[in-house]
Amino acid sequence: MNQKDQLDERKVTILKAIIKTYLETGEPVGSRTISKYTDLHLSSATIRNEMSDLEELGYIVQPHTSAGRIPSDRGYRFYVDQIILEKEEEVTEIKDMMLKRVDRVELLLKQMAKLLAQNTNYAAMISAPQYHRNKLKFIQMSKVDEERLLVVIVVEGNVIKNTMIPLRKELNEEGLLNLNILLNNALNGLTIEEINLEVISSLKIQAGPHSEVVDRVLTEVAAAIRGDDEDLQIYTSGATNIFKYPELSDGERASKLIGTLEQKELLQGLVDDVNSSESGLGIQVYIGDEAPETMKDCSIVTANYELGEGLRGTIGIIGPKRMDYEKVLSALRNLMTQLDIILKKDER
């Protein structure tokens, strides 16, 4: 007979409350504690009767006379089986949702953020996938007339940007050919981080009188690689969870933190920091002063999920410095795996 078949919803709720409380405190749990713990709005007497039934069924035991109850091995087994079942149902729910295609990506990410906030008891954010740290594939400069150049920039993922730049000095066809060769040989295959000051300085020297053209082209290359951030979507959930932690819940701190979670441009800075890190797709932890200015009282754990061709999004969990890091890291790894599998599958 299935264990759950013997327990109605009330008994299951009370049993879970006993086990969770015992895991937190290590002390036998009484009916009065459970009456405060659950939202069943039952009297202590009713809860005592339910606890007596649970004891007769072998899910809890009373270690000492007149003491509270603790879980039995059977109770622990029920609890663990329920957790496993709930997690499997959660994953199945997410997969089923994603199989309904791209129009639902926004819904999926919002749901993921909500689940992450619920599972960790902290604030959560997820950015929609965008092209980040793309590599330059090709540059082609062509003269429109004596005063203008058309610059075509192709970056990883076949993202193309066309732009016009002014010509302030005469540039003949041979000079233009040499500039095209110079820039393509030096820059193709590089990310924005790899086009550093040393590379830029060398190119300007080699370009001689046309260093201004090189400077303008490099500005456009940087904009093309970074992409257009205006459409970036960042989904947040669990902002009010910060009120559960006294060190974050006073007026000024809470106001700043919630304000940050509501302003896309502030979260964009965090996303940019994650994407510019040498850690790549690895999990990163920012503690106190390592975090953005408005989050100095927090710890932030972030990771990227990747869809290939440089398409990448960021997941973040924001909480107190005393957050349960082990739990958060586990939740992030699981979510990254789910997103990678589900979104890649959905692309096919």
Image (cartoon, rainbow, N blue to C red):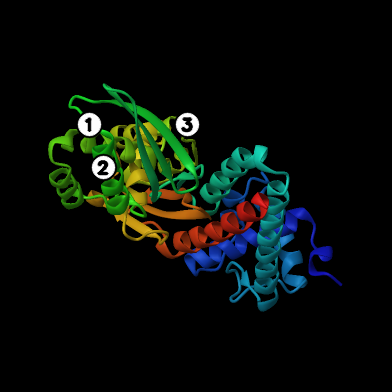
Residue at horizontal 49 percent and vertical 44 percent from the top = 158
Callout 1: helix, strand or loop?
loop
Q: In screen coordinates, is 234 left or right of 260? A: right
Q: Nearer the viewer, mark 3 or mark 1?
A: 1
Mark 2 or mark 1, which has the lower sequence index? 1
Which residue is at the front of the view, 161 or 251?
Answer: 161
Instruction: Examine the rendered structure and indicate whether residue 78 appears above or below residue 144.
Output: below
Q: Nearer the viewer, mark 2 or mark 1?
A: 1
Q: CA distance from mark 2 to mark 1?
A: 10 Å
188 sits to left or right of 35: left
Q: Which residue is mark 2?
A: 179
The residue mark sitting in front, 2 or 3, is 2
> How many circles with numbers are drawn on the protein?
3
- Which residue in the structure is indicated by mark 3? 231
* Near-viewer residue (316 or 8): 316
Please tell me how crowded label 3 is: few (under 14), some (14-19), or many (20+) other residues with Cα within 10 Å: few
Dots 2, 1 in contact, CB < 8 A: yes
Closer to the camera, 176 or 232? Answer: 176
Q: What residue lies at 76% left-to-right and 65% top-to-bottom?
A: 53
Label 3 secondary element: helix
Q: Report, in whole angstroms, how far the alpha carbon at label 2 lies from the one at label 3.
A: 33 Å
Asked if residue 299 shows in the view, the reply is no
Q: Observer-nearest residue: 225 or 107?
A: 225
Upstream in sequence: badge 3 or badge 1: 1
> Mark 1 — residue?
171
On screen, residue 97 versus residue 218, left or right, reads right
Circle 2: residue type: Leu
Q: Residue at x 65, y 69 (%)?
A: 80
Q: Measuring from the top left, give residue 294's x and y in whole percent.
A: 28, 38
Amino acid type of the residue tagged 3 in the rendering: Asp
